[in-house]
């Protein structure tokens, strides 16, 4: 399971021109599930993402989490995080988790984020939809967080 976490000063998701999620300060989290991922990875990663200390305190030191700052989160499903680009020039997406299970994991990840932060602070994209995702990366700060089989 892979997350691409971006600290943002604003972010949005649109589907067919309609806004489905929009935030100011917080995190845009791209969520990708891969074959072999276990359901118990979800809670670990969601809690870690919400507690990740990547926001600056009054001294300019990264010591605060989105939970601490009162910021918001948008979670977007992103199967392309499973891309294998080791051979050739065309990414291989064969390692992406099958859509039915990936959607279940994605929904559960968003639910754990809601438990951590409150429902009003967590937005999502729409699974399997063609989405426009926009953001202003603050810093820039981008963190890759993964959990793999031991």
Image: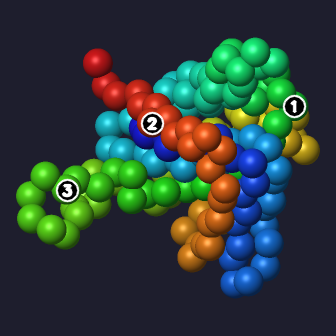
Nearer to me, 94 or 8: 8
**Residue at the spot x=75%, y=48% of the render?**
9
Badge nearest the viewer, 1 or 3: 1
In the rendered image, the residue lying farthest to the front is 59
The Cα atoms of the two marked residues, 3 and 2, are separated by 17 Å
Q: Crowding near pointer 2: few (<14 within 10 Å), some, many (20+)?
A: few
Nearer to me, 139 or 13: 139
Residue 70's label in the rendered image is 1
Q: Are marks 2 and 1 in contact (CB under 8 Å)?
A: no
**Residue at the spot x=87%, y=31% of the render?**
70
The Cα atoms of the two marked residues, 1 and 3, are separated by 37 Å
Secondary structure at numbered mark 3: loop
Above or below for 107 versus 19: above
Q: Are marks 3 and 2 in contact (CB under 8 Å)?
A: no
- The residue that disc 2 covers is 144
Asked if residue 125 can be seen in this view, the reply is no
Secondary structure at numbered mark 1: loop
**Residue at the spot x=73%, y=62% of the render?**
12
Above or below for 49 versus 73: above
Q: Quadrant of the C terminus?
A: top left
Residue 126's label in the rendered image is none
Q: Earlier in the sequence, mark 2 or mark 1?
A: 1
Secondary structure at numbered mark 2: strand
Where in the figure is residue 105, as x and y percent of width and height? 55, 43
- Tally the numbered discs: 3
Where in the figure is residue 28, as x and y percent of width and height? 65, 48
Coloring basis for residues? rainbow
Nearer to me, 54 or 79: 54
Where in the figure is residue 7, as x and y percent of width and height? 64, 41
Q: Earlier in the sequence, mark 3 or mark 2?
A: 3
């Amino acid at each position: 399971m892979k997350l691409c976490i971006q600290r943002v000063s604003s972010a949005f998701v649109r589907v067919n021109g309609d806004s489905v999620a929009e935030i100011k300060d917080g995190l845009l989290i791209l969520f990708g599930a891969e074959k072999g991922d276990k359901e118990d990875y979800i809670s670990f990663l969601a809690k870690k993402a919400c507690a990740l200390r990547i926001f600056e305190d009054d001294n300019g030191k990264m010591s605060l989490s989105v939970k601490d700052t009162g910021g918001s989160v948008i979670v977007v499903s992103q199967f392309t995080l499973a891309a294998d680009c080791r051979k050739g020039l065309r990414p291989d997406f064969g390692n992406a988790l099958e859509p039915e299970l990936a959607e279940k994991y994605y929904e559960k990840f968003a639910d754990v984020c809601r438990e951590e932060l409150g429902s009003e602070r967590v937005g999502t994209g729409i699974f399997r939809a063609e989405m426009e995702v926009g953001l202003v990366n603050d810093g820039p700060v981008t963190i890759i967080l993964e959990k793999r089989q031991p």
